[in-house]
């Protein structure tokens, strides 16, 4: 069993002091599933975000609802990041973040190779080539925007979760999820929208502001709405992860014996 994510033992509940952080072993059965899900969400969001989406103007406000094609999926990346940080610690969260974007960069490079390959010379082949260039050509800009935004936002998100857990231990899970979600999404969205707006066709400061404000509000609302389900899944994973149960029990026994 590895000890990479092992943290100082938490005090026993009766001591009245905040409990320290306990993390599971990455080799357990849940980490690979969470990692695969995060990679998939990030790659698909990068493709979808290359498309600008407008739901029209809100009557009487002059505010246009502008977003991108990845808006409905990307908040899940932060939910998964919260789960990974809470269960496996900040080092595992950093590994998941870097893995997601390494795969995303590979996907972006693959799109450019696909575009560069010579198409069939008939009318249908040339039409498909033009469609690929239009759809996948700007994805590298979105990947760059996502890389900058997600690295900053998710790193802040993971930092907040891990530091709060060090102070409160197993208590305060809901508070950790609420606090980290807002900060991470705010930083991520501002950076992402500033770079990706070029790729999706946003040309004015007003459109950028509408795109950014809506992005922050939507992502935070979705994450907050999912917190009951997120916390329930985290607690279930803690109960069913052998290494987490073992480390938590050992920490409590060590403190009781001290």
Image (cartoon, helix red, strand yellow):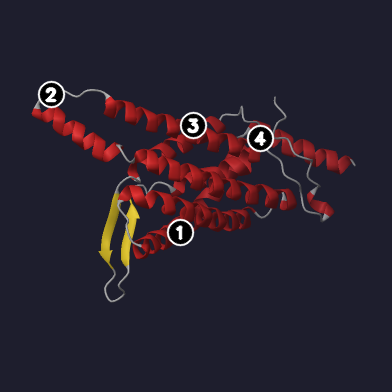
Foreground residue, 57 or 25? Answer: 57
Query: Which of 181 and 10 lies nearest the eye of the viewer?
Result: 181
Q: How many marks?
A: 4
How far apart are labels 2 and 1 at the CA level? 45 Å
Mark 2 lies on residue: 121
* Proximity of marks 1 and 4: CB atoms separated by less than 8 Å: no
From what the image shows, is residue 48 above or below residue 202?
Answer: above
**Alpha-carbon span between mark 4 and mark 3:** 24 Å
At mark 4, the secondary structure is loop
Q: Earlier in the sequence, mark 4 or mark 2?
A: 4
Of mark 1 and mark 3, the one earlier in the sequence is 3
Q: In this view, does 78 lie to the left or right of 2?
A: left
Which quarter of the rendered picture does the N terminus lie within? Answer: top right
Marks 4, 2: nearer the viewer: 2
In the rendered image, which residue does mark 3 sit on? Answer: 102
- State the mark number for residue 24: 4
Query: If the image is split into quadrants, where does the C terminus sit?
Result: top right
Q: Badges 2 and 1: C-beta atoms under 8 Å apart? A: no
Circle 2 or circle 1, nearest the eye: 2
Is residue 69 something that shows in the picture?
A: no
Does dot 1 land on a helix, a strand or a loop?
helix
Of callouts 1 and 4, the N-terminal one: 4
Give the spatial CA distance, label 1 vs label 4: 31 Å
- Nearer mark to the viewer, of 4 and 3: 3
Q: Which element type, helix, strand or loop, lies under badge 3?
A: helix
Residue 49 in the figure: left or right of residue 181: left
In the rendered structure, find residue 216 and report the number of the disc placed on it. 1
Q: Nearer the viewer, residue 36 or 201?
A: 201
Q: How crowded is mark 2: few (under 14 residues within 10 Å), some or many (20 or more)?
A: few
């Amino acid at each position: 069993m590895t000890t990479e994510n092992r943290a100082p033992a938490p005090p026993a509940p009766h001591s009245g002091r905040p409990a320290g952080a306990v993390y599971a072993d990455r080799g357990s059965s849940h980490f690979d599933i969470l990692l695969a899900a995060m990679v998939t969400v990030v790659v698909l969001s990068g493709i979808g975000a290359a498309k600008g989406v407008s739901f029209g103007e809100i009557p009487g406000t002059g505010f246009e609802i502008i977003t991108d094609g990845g808006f409905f999926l990307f908040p899940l990346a932060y939910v998964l990041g919260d789960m990974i940080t809470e269960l496996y610690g900040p080092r595992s969260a950093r590994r998941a973040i870097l893995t997601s974007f390494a795969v995303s960069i590979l996907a972006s490079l693959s799109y450019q190779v696909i575009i560069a390959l010579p198409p069939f010379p008939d009318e249908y082949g040339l039409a498909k080539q033009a469609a690929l260039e239009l759809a996948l050509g700007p994805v590298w800009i979105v990947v760059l925007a996502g890389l900058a935004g997600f690295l900053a936002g998710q790193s802040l998100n993971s930092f907040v979760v891990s530091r709060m857990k060090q102070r409160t231990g197993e208590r305060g899970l809901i508070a950790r999820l609420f606090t980290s979600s807002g900060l991470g999404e705010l930083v991520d969205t501002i950076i992402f929208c500033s770079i990706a707006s070029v790729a999706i066709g946003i040309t004015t400061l007003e459109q950028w502001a509408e795109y950014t404000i809506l992005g922050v509000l939507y992502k935070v609302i979705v994450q907050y709405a999912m917190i009951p389900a997120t916390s329930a899944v985290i607690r279930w994973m803690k109960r069913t992860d052998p290494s987490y149960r073992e480390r938590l029990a050992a920490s409590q026994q060590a403190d009781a014996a001290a």
